Image (cartoon, rainbow, N blue to C red):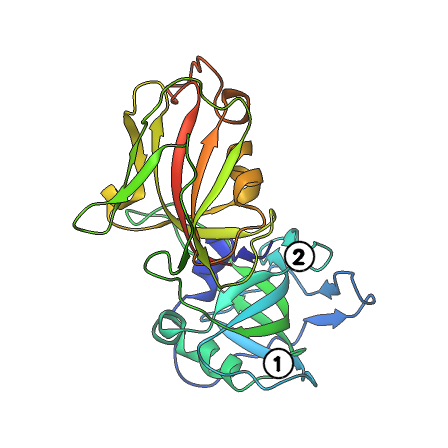
Amino acid sequence: MRKIVAPLLAATLLLSACSGAEEPLPSLTVTSEGEGKAPKVEFDAPLKVKKPVVKELEEGDGAEIDPGQTLSLRMTAFNAKDGSRTMETYTKGSGDDLPLDDQMKNGNPQLYKVLKDARVGSQFAYAVPGVEGGQSGPSRPGQVLVFTIDSAEKTVAPLEKAKGKPVEPVEELPTVKENSDGVPRITIDKPDPKPDELVAQTLVKGSGEVVKKSDTITAHYVGVQWSNGKKFDSSWDRGEPSEFPLTNVIEGWTKGLSGQTIGSRVLLVIPPELAYGKDPASGQPGGTLVFVVDILGVS
């Protein structure tokens, strides 16, 4: 699964940079430790800059990058004050995603301009000044980031709703019909006997890529309890789809949505042992649960 850049790093990469000549980073040296390993980064601490500084360390030999793509970055970050490393993704299973979009263009035109003219495989150093504490928030030390552009892919916008070929409903399962706004409504026609195993019934078969259990999906969904048909959650009611990793949801979602395709609408009937249990203490709905999920996109 690819990850969106962590919030603090995202804020760093979106810092508005001042125009004018870049400040040098004379004490910074970066040495490759080999493929799959984080590079060795050394600098004289504290490293102080008055404004954000971006410097290309090595030009890549991969494809040219275009605005609108999402970059996958291998990254290592350091506290500029004491030189300690705070994170790295060079040795992880995947890099961090950074969209090269209008938010980047407006939030950090300096970095945007450098990245849009780069190539896959290029490596950069990026230093930002610290932030003094005050009414706007706590103080934060400056950061030094070294990152390599691992890949660049076209950003695909999520669908607005399920789109594909309708599938004939299966008897003995809850009925799903859309209201006048196109929002699905679930009716438990026959409360007994309820399924004792996971049911993942495709209602609309989308033509997009296959969802893997390691993916993060964008989806609209509604959930009701089998026992009383009462709705307990709905992204449609909130007016926008949700995004979540399938590795961090109830097991019934992970198993039931893995192998489905983007654009599909899926009816899930999930027994308690794959949901929140028969009588959860955390306020979550108990017993067998029924969901309708529109899979709109994958990141």
Q: Is residue 22 visible?
A: no
> In the image, residue 224 lies at what x, y percent?
33, 29
Secondary structure state at the residue bearing disc 2? loop
User: Crowding near pointer 2: few (<14 within 10 Å), some, many (20+)?
Assistant: some
- Tell whether 234 sits left or right of 105: left
The residue that label 1 is drawn on is 56
> Could you tell which of marks 1 and 2 lies nearer the N-terminus?
1
- Tell whether 138 sits left or right of 275: left
Against 197, is 201 above or below?
below
Which residue occupies 45% across, 69% down? 156
Secondary structure state at the residue bearing disc 1? strand
Label for residue 89? 2
Which residue occupies 44% across, 77% down? 68
Which three-letter amino acid code belongs to the residue tagged 2? Answer: Thr
- Tell whether 208 sits left or right of 178: right
Against 58, is 39 above or below?
above
Task: Give the image quarter of residue 226.
Answer: top left
Q: Is residue 43 visible?
A: yes
